Image: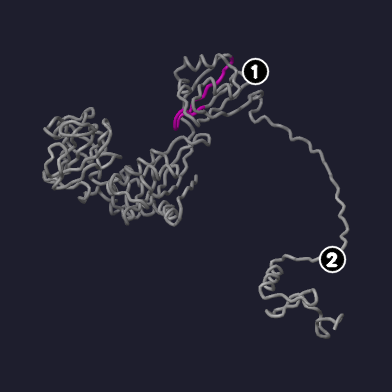
Amino acid sequence: MAGQPSHPPGREPEILADRVRGIVAPVAGLRLTPWKALAVAVLGLSGVAAFGLAPDTVVDPVDTVLTVRTLPAPALVDAAGEEGAGMYWSEERVRRGDTIGALLARAGVDDPGLRTFVHGNPAARPLYQLRPGQPVRVATGADGALVELRFSPAAREALTIRRDGDVLRAERTEADVETRVVLKAGLIGSSLFGAADAIGLPDAITMALAEVFSGDIDFHYDLRRGDRFAVLYETYHVDGEPAGSGRILAAEFENRGRTLRVFRWTASDGVERYYTDDGRSSRRAFLRSPMEFSRVTSGFTMARLHPIFRTWRAHKGVDYGAPTGTPIRATADGVVALAGSRGGYGNVVILRHGGGYSTLYGHLSRFARGVTTGARVRQGETIGYVGQTGWATGPHLHYEFRVGDEPRNPQTIALPAADPVPAGERGAFAAAVAPAAEQLAVARRAPRPVLASAE
């Protein structure tokens, strides 16, 4: 019946009910579907009120008043005090192609005597070795004359030029360096350097990372697309600006289905070394490769078509292709048994190591200084440079690994390791590396490359 209430006698109209079916709306005769009812309930529970206006409803306008208040400007305080009164500090960053004159002009320095001073004072000469991105801070007087200049030409070094009356003085000191710790992780696409560049890893850290794992991974041969790595390392800052990188504190590499993890730890003898989780030394008695980065052009095989004589012969070593002059390093400590010329090997270095091991490096363009027969060399020391001497069709290194004078495949042979953490220091080692292990775990759980830092 028209005009009759839609609710039973004695009951007030419902706004929301606990029933799924037939929920009564504020407007008589309007029923909500279950999904619409759920939406209304959610709005109600979340504290959002919905208001409806009936047609032709008149809303009274709300009066607004614009108020403008003038606030007093804060008093400026000269942070430099009376001594720095009249000084104006500014900072400029070196741009590509900058000269010291252009840089100082942008900084508002109008001081003809400064260029003469920089040119003639040995302590100030680093200003002629500007690198893009470096900050230079200058303080000038009201007339544009230089009062002070601050510049960090290298990590841990500070250059200050000050005006003392009419005289300019330059001083090079050790900078106040702040050390921070950075964690980065990456994914191998084509190469280690490509992955490192993608996450902004410094070249020095990339090289150190390859060195740390060189006993277990041949970075010319073993890398696979999808391999992951994480590295925890130090960075140096001077006045808040990056000033180089420091040591690797911990690192992890997932390669060909295995996970390798190392930690830097200082033993009781004061020497810092890298060890695995269980205290084994990550340093092998032999490096896996005699070159930091190159490509394998010919592997170890008992039957290879010789590129010169066109006959099938055994190739009892590994050839690494690289430009002439590329440094070659000793893969282990040893004594130079021969540094000279030998037949098809051309210029060759043969090293004798302990335990009946020896290594051979052939086709060198020249020998490193001090590498002569009978000399002692250390692991990683440069012993010569890539060349094309002897029977060679192009510049490369021929490397042989021998046990008891019998050639073995240097890419697959199990290499002996260095001494582990002493048994009496295992507890101290575990406690010392635990924080770094937790940070590597953060990178391991991250689905994407990690970029994090902490002081």
Disc 1 packing (10 Å; few <14; some 14–19; many ≥20)? few
- Between 233 and 344, the residue placed more toward the observer is 344
Q: Circle 2 sits in a helix, a strand or a loop, which is it? A: loop
Q: Is residue 298 magenta?
A: no
Q: Which residues are magenta?
A: 151-165
Q: Is residue 425 left or right of residue 303?
A: right
On-image quarter of the N terminus: bottom right
x and y percentages locating residue 9 in the rendered image? 83, 85
Q: Quadrant of residue 368?
A: top left
- 187 and 142: which one is in front? 187
Give the residue drawn at x 45%, y 45%: 182
The mark total stands at: 2
Q: Is residue 92 visible?
A: yes
Q: Amino acid at mark 1?
A: Asp
The label on residue 143 is 1
Q: Position of residue 439 (x, y in %)?
A: 44, 52
The residue lying toward the viewer, choosing from 389 and 116, is 389
Q: Give how far apart the Cα atoms at labels 1 and 2 are.
A: 73 Å
Residue at which label 2 appears? 55
Q: Are marks 1 and 2 in contact (CB under 8 Å)?
A: no
Q: Report the amino acid beneath label 2.
A: Pro
